Amino acid sequence: MLIRKAKVQDLNALVQFNQAMALETEGLALDETTLVKGVNTLLNHPDKGFYLVAEQGGEILGSLMVTFEWSDWRAKDYYWIQSVYIRPQNRRQGIYSKLYAEVKALAAANGGAASFRLYVEQENLPAQQTYQALGMEQSYYLMYEEKPAAK
């Protein structure tokens, strides 16, 4: 299995994975035009973050996205792991753990990370168990947000 940074040629697979993940976890049907623009933007602006893919036999089995948040307290970036998706037929095969190990290796090669963070749905117990098994702990912080008014 090859773990690598995604390329522009992976756009369609990443869009499909994001659509499947949003539908599976939140019952959301994402707007494809907006999603293509969002994925393409990240693929073309590495300062914003990157995608990793797990590939075997020319097929992409899973992916995740990392974005950066600067910490003035720690003088390093937080690595936010997002858009995690492993194809259902490939789950429980250690693919996420390989992707996560590569995130940590890339961070170490770039001066380290303040920490590795992610959001997970409160009801998604299998994902929570996976993250805990890899050494992650539930954060002290709660999240609040305000969405801009629709135009």
Image: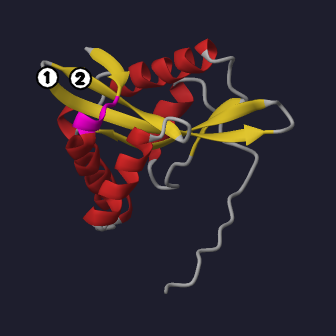
Left/right placement of residue 95 relative to residue 83 reads: left
Residue drawn at the location 21% of the way across and 45% of the way down: 12
Residue drawn at the location 40% of the way across and 19% of the way down: 98
Residue position marked by numbered label 1 in the rendering: 58
Residue position marked by numbered label 2 in the rendering: 55
Q: From this view, report whether residue 41 is shown above or below residue 58.
A: below
Q: Quadrant of residue 34?
A: bottom left
Left/right placement of residue 14 relative to residue 58 reads: right
Find out whether the residues at labels 2 and 1 contact each other: C-beta distance under 8 Å.
Answer: yes
- Residue 117, percent from left and from top: 61, 38
Q: From this view, report whether residue 11 is shown above or below residue 37.
A: above
> Secondary structure beneath disc 2?
strand
Quadrant containing the N terminus in the rendered view: top left
* Magenta stretch bounds: 6-10
Inspect this view and state whether residue 126 appears. no
Q: Quadrant of residue 143?
A: bottom right
Work out whether residue 22 or residue 3 is closer to the camera in this orientation and state it: 3
- Residue 83, percent from left and from top: 41, 46
Residue drawn at the location 40% of the way across and 36% of the way down: 64
- Residue 113, percent from left and from top: 68, 25
Which kind of residue does numbered mark 2 sit on?
A: Glu
Count residues near mark 1 (Cα–Cα under 10 Å), then give few for <14, some for 14-19, many for 20+. few
Count residues near mark 2 (Cα–Cα under 10 Å), then give few for <14, some for 14-19, many for 20+. some
Decide whether the magenta segment is chiefly helix, strand or loop: helix
